Image (cartoon, helix red, strand yellow):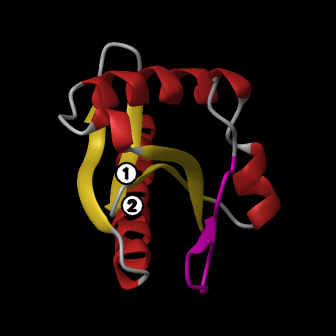
Amino acid sequence: MTDRRTRQKALGRGHRGEWLAALALMLKGYRIVARRYKTKLGEIDLIARRGDLVLIVEVKARRTLVEAMEAVAYGSERRIEGAADLWLARQPDYGKLSVRFDMVAVLPRRWPVHVENAFQGRN
């Protein structure tokens, strides 16, 4: 029973973290176009857009910024990139979009930290 309860608490923390991250991005002028976008290749926590700039955002709730940055492993980056490719291919204005892979760290008792270009997508 405790495993289930632990998972539910982690899931709730993750959803609150994504909500806070979305709020922080909206206050910076971005429009959230997708949350928890799932594909067969992976999941994207948030997809945000401002003009022709698309942010593919990984949200990490951790105790420190360093822990959050280290939590995005190479394998995770590849899955996120694959999912982003699928999402982008479905966009009618795909050719004029600029894409950036960002991270938002949700830290205790602090406003979320937006890290631009947290990792580079393949070219």
Image quadrant for the N terminus?
A: top left
Q: In which quarter of the image is the C terminus?
A: top right
Depth order, front residue of 96/118? 96
Cα distance in 3D space between marks 1 and 2: 8 Å
User: Which residue appears at 47% of the width and 46% of the height?
Assistant: 98
Query: What label does residue 46 carry, if any?
Result: 1
Compared with residue 4, is residue 26 higher up or lower down, i.e. above or below? below
Q: Name the quadrant containing residue 25.
A: bottom left
Q: Is residue 107 magenta?
A: yes
Instruction: From the viewer's perspective, tell me whether residue 40 is left or right of residue 121.
Output: left
Residue 73's quadrant in the figure? top right
Q: Residue at x 69, y 42 (%)?
A: 119
Q: Which residue is drawn at 21% across and 27% down?
A: 90
In front of the other: label 1 or label 2? 1
Magenta region includes residue 71:
no
Where does the image place residue 24, in percent across and percent down from the top left? Answer: 43, 78
- What percent of the width, then of the height, locates residue 109? 60, 86
Give the SS element for disc 1.
Answer: strand
Q: Which of 20 and 26 is in front in this view?
A: 26
- Location of residue 20 (image quadrant): bottom left
- Magenta part of the protein: which range? 106-118
Q: Do the residues labelled 1 and 2 touch (CB within 8 Å)?
A: yes
Depicted 41 relative to depicted 81: above or below = above
Q: Name the residue under label 2.
A: 18
Q: Where is residue 80 in the image (x, y as percent from the top left)?
A: 50, 30
Q: Is residue 35 visible?
A: yes
Per the rendering, the mark at residue 65 is none
